Amino acid sequence: MDGMSLILGGMLGILAGWAFSSASVKEREASTKLNKVSKAKEELNKIEGEAKNNEEGSLTDTVQSFFFRLLGFAVIIVLGAIFFYSLG
């Protein structure tokens, strides 16, 4: 009986060790996947922030361009008025 108990105990020990190592590997894989997801979320937030900054910058550029064109048009009108005034 002692030999049989020793063999049975060894088998149970091997089975418990295998289950523990399998759980440890699965936990490590889950941790790795979680880290990848976290990095992907950070990258997405970074890209989203850059897109918002670009959108705000684009609106600012559009408004600024409009006012510069308006200023250029006003300068041309003033120069035209001075030219026609000098003729008359």
Image (tube, grey):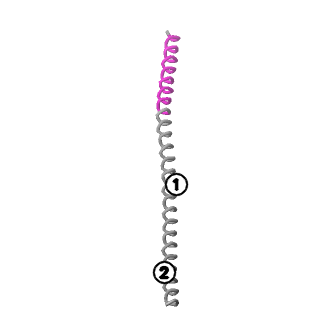
Magenta highlight on residue 85: yes
80 lies above or below 53? above
Image x and y of residue 22, in percent: 49, 72
Rendered residue at 49%/54% (across/down): 40
Image x and y of residue 49, in percent: 50, 43
Along the line of sight, the residue nearer the viewer: 63 or 49 = 49
Main secondary-structure element of the magenta-colored stretch: helix
- Disc 2, SS: helix
Rendered residue at 51%/27% (across/down): 68
Circle 2 packing at 10 Å, graded few (<14), some (14-19), many (20+), is: few
- Look at the image and give the residue range highlighted in magenta: 61-87
Rendered residue at 50%/83% (across/down): 9
- Disc 1, SS: helix
Along the line of sight, the residue nearer the viewer: 59 or 2 = 2
Are circles 1 and 2 on residues that touch, CB within 8 Å?
Answer: no
Give the number of the mark in front: 1 or 2.
2
Circle 1 packing at 10 Å, graded few (<14), some (14-19), many (20+), is: few
Q: In the rendered structure, which amino acid carries the disc numbered 1? A: Lys
Name the residue that disc number 2 marks. 12
Image x and y of residue 38, in percent: 50, 54
Q: In the rendered structure, which amino acid carries the disc numbered 2? A: Leu
Rendered residue at 50%/11% (across/down): 85
Magenta highlight on residue 73: yes
Image x and y of residue 50, in percent: 51, 43
24 lies above or below 81? below
Name the residue that disc number 1 marks. 39
40 lies above or below 20? above
Q: CA distance from mark 1 to mark 2?
A: 40 Å
Along the line of sight, the residue nearer the viewer: 79 or 31 = 31
Of the two numbered discs 1 and 2 on the same chain, state the one appearing first in sequence: 2
